[in-house]
Image (cartoon, rainbow, N blue to C red):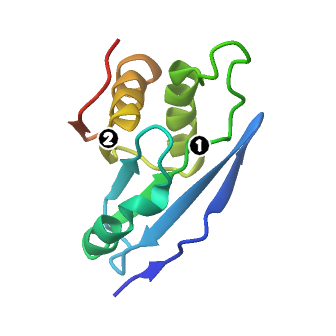
Amino acid sequence: MHEKTLEPLMLAMGDVAVPYLHYECLNKQAQTLMLLHATGLPPQLWHPIAEALARTYRVIIPYYGDHREADAETGAVDWMALARDLARFCNALNVTKPFVVGHSMGATVAAMSEAACGLGAAALFLIEPIFL
């Protein structure tokens, strides 16, 4: 059906390297679908969904677990930095007008990337975004 890898690939983007999963669709003209995970969850949790969707879409799942240093005081990663990283990530992979599905932190980062960083998504599907 399609090629899949559960071991992350790495994309170097200047000051950071973002691990990601890639499910290639046999249809080389397939539109890209990005899946963004919630805080503290690995991208592999999307595997059953990604596997099914890869029949129709090229599926990419960046891992936002530890590619950026957390703030020493709060232990948090700056979500705006992650939003910028998402736009840069898509640009580096020549992904234009992706469909983006995000859960929790992933949904918030997707919305922030679209609104403030010029992501240019074809559509956003946001599951339980955390807008503070």
Picture residue at 33% right of the left edge, 55% below the top: 33
**In the rendered image, which quarter is residue 45 located in?**
bottom left
Q: Residue at x 26, y 41 (%)?
A: 122
Q: Which residue is mark 2?
A: 103
Disc with the residue nearer the chain's start (1 vs 2) = 1
Three-letter code, disc 1: Gly
At mark 1, the secondary structure is loop
Side of 126 where 76 appears, left or right:
right
Q: Which quadrant holds the N terminus?
A: bottom left
Q: Quadrant of residue 107?
A: top left
105 or 5: nearer the viewer: 105
Q: Image height check: is 119 above or below 132?
A: below
Q: Residues within 10 Å of mark 1 (few under 14, many from 20)?
A: some
Please name the residue that numbered disc 1 is placed on.
65
The reply to whether the C-beta atoms of the residues labelled 1 and 2 are less than 8 Å apart is no
- Coordinates of residue 9 in the picture (x, y in percent): 64, 63
Distance of mark 1 from mark 2, alpha carbons? 14 Å
Where is 116 relative to 52, above or below? above
> Which element carries disc 2, helix, strand or loop?
strand
Q: Residue at x 56, y 56 (%)?
A: 20
Give me the residue at 77% from left, 33% from top. Answer: 15
Expressed as whole percent of the image width and height from the top left, the position of residue 11 reads 67, 52
Looking at the rendered structure, the kind of residue marked 2 is: His
Side (left or right) of 99 relative to 14: left
